Amino acid sequence: MEEKFEDNKFKEEKSYFKSFLGLLSFSTIIPINVHTTINDMAKLTWLWPIISIFTGIIGVIIAYLTTNILNFNPILTAAIVYGFLIWINGFNHLDGLMDFGDAIMAHGTPEKKIAIMKDLNVGTGAIALFFIISMITVFSIYNILSNPIINHSFGIIFTIIIGEMGGKIGLLTTCLSSKSANDGLGKPFIENINPIKYLLSLIIPLIVSVTITYIFGFSIYLAIFGILGGILAGGLVSYTAKKHFKIANGDVLGASNEIGRMFSFIFILIAINLF
C-alpha cells in the first residue's frame, strides 16, 4: 500500500511538471515536445508569470547587447525588444488584441461583436488598436531606457522583466474578473483561476520585481507600480469585455496580455519620474 502511494505521488508530481512544460510550449514558440491537454495546462494558469520571467530575461539580454555592444539608439533597442516579446509568444496575444480591436469598434449585439471577433478578416479597429498599443509600448520602453533621472543605469534594463510579467498579470486579472464563454480556448483558463490562485500568482512577480529594484538601488515603487499597471489593465479589459460581449474568450485574454504589458511599462515610467 505504501509503495502504491509513493508511485501515485511520483506520477502526480511528474504530471504537474509535464503540465507546466505544456503551458510553456503553449505560451511560447519554444519547441518543447510535450503532449498534454489544455485542461491540464489550465490548472497551472496561476504560474503564467513565471514563464514571462524567462522571456523577460531574454529581452534583457537583447537590450544589453543592442545598447552596450552594438551601440544602438535606445529607440531602436525598444522596438527590437518589443518585437521579440510579441514574437516569442507566437503572436498569439497580438492576434487576440487585433480581434478585440475589431470587435469593440463594431455596433450591434454582443453576439454580433463576438462573431466579428472570431472573423478571420482584419479591419480598421484591429490595425488601429495594434498601432496604439505597439507605439505606446515601444516609446514607454524607450523612455525607461533613456530616462535622465536614472542616469543611464545598467540595471534599468531589468525592468523589462517587470513589464513582461505585467502582461501576464493583466491576463490573470481578466481571467479572475470575467465570465467565460460556453466554449473556446479561453474557457479552461478563466475557470481555473480563483482569488487564492490569483493572489499566489502575484507573489512571485512581486518578489522578483522588488529584488530587481533592491539590487540596483531603485525605488521599490518601480516594482509596485509595474504590478499595479498590469492589474489595472486587466480590470479595464475585463470591464470592456463585459460591456461589449458579456463574456471573455481567448481573444480577450490575449488583448489583456498586450495591454497589461503596455500599462506596466507606463506605470514603471511614472514611478521613475515620481519617486
Image (spheres, grey):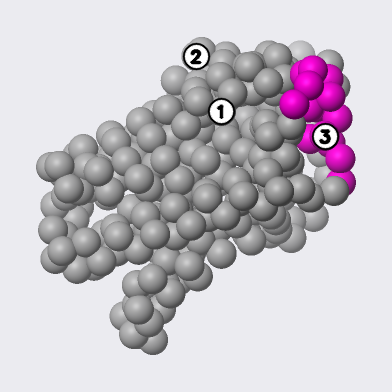
| Pointer 2 residue | 196
Q: Which of the two labelled residues, at mark 3 and mark 1, occupies the earlier sequence position?
A: 3
What is the x, y in percent for residue 142? 35, 63
Q: Is residue 102 magenta?
A: no
| Pointer 3 residue | 116
The quadrant of the rendering that contains the C terminus is top left
Mark 1 to mark 2: distance in Å? 21 Å
| Residue ID at (83%, 20%) | 111
| Residue ID at (86%, 30%) | 115
Secondary structure under tag 3 reads helix
The quadrant of the rendering that contains the N terminus is top right
| Contact? badges 2 and 3 (CB < 8 Å) | no
Are there few (<14), some (14-19), or many (20+) residues within 10 Å of tag 2? few
Q: Which of the two labelled residues, at mark 1 and mark 2, occupies the earlier sequence position?
A: 2
Secondary structure under tag 2 reads helix
| Residue ID at (64%, 16%) | 242
What is the x, y in percent for residue 173? 52, 25
| Pointer 1 residue | 237
Chain part drawn in magenta: 107-120
Q: Is residue 217 above or below residue 190?
A: below
Q: Which of the two labelled residues, at mark 2 and mark 3, occupies the earlier sequence position?
A: 3
Q: Is residue 128 above or below residue 99?
A: below
What is the x, y in percent for residue 59? 46, 63
Figure label count: 3
Secondary structure under tag 1 reads helix
Q: Is residue 209 visible?
A: no
Residue 133 as seen in the image, left or right of residue 244: left
Residue type at numbered disc 2 = Ile
Residue type at numbered disc 1 = Val
Name the mark nearer the viewer: 3 or 1. Answer: 3
| Residue ID at (74%, 56%) | 32
